[in-house]
Amino acid sequence: ELIRMNTLQMPSYRLVPLTYQLFSRIDAAEGEEKNGFQHTLRQLVLKLCSDHPYHGIVQLIALSNGQKIGTGVSGRHADTYLENVGVSKIEAVDSVIKELQKKAPKYVSGLIENYKTLCDSYISTGEWDTAHIKGPSAYKNIPFSKAKLDLPTCLT
């Protein structure tokens, strides 16, 4: 209880260097009491992302995309990856993002949507099939206009 009160009263800029470590601990809090570790951690993440959205939202979006792997990852590599990224962590991050969109300033909600669009476009670009391109030097100068990607119009 003492740690929870002191942590939430601490200035959030002191926690910015710890975003990766803090966010990696987010998990589903099933049956946890109102002042348990996960509840305190979620409150801390909400405060950090509200006060410093450019330092925290990208990590949250990356965690929420944890189950999106392309067709290029298959077999035991995909299984190992999916074992390390638990569904409960993704669900917990999604609930934090929804809560952040409700409670944070309005511009933060817009940033979240824009970052989601950008990350989804990066994933689509990374999964683009290059099998039809032949030759060792063909990969170096591929015009973006050749890519038949389904990107949002704001990015094309």
Image: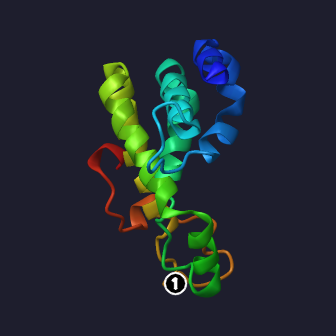
Q: Nearer the viewer, residue 18 or 114?
A: 18
- Identified at 41% across, 67% down, the residue is 146
The colour mode here is rainbow
Residue sticking out furthest to the bottom: 75
Q: Nearer the viewer, residue 88 or 138?
A: 88
What SS does tag 1 mark? loop
Q: Is residue 90 above or below residue 54?
A: below
Q: Is residue 122 above or below residue 115?
A: below
Q: Is residue 89 above or below residue 134?
A: above
Estimate how packed mark 1 is, as few (under 14), some (14 to 19) or many (20 or more) residues with alpha carbons within 10 Å. Answer: few
Q: Is residue 115 above or below residue 133?
A: above
Say left or right for 10 vs 106: right
- Identified at 69% across, 40% down, the residue is 21
- Identified at 27% across, 48% down, the residue is 153
Whether residue 63 appears in this view of the structure is yes
Residue 6 placed where, x, y %?
A: 65, 15
**Amino acid type of the residue tagged 1 in the rendering:** Ala
Whether residue 122 appears in this view of the structure is no
> How many marks do you count on the picture?
1
Which quarter of the rendered picture does the N terminus lie within? top right
Residue 155 placed where, x, y %?
A: 36, 46
> On the image, numbered disc 1 is attached to which residue?
131
Residue 147 placed where, x, y %?
A: 41, 67
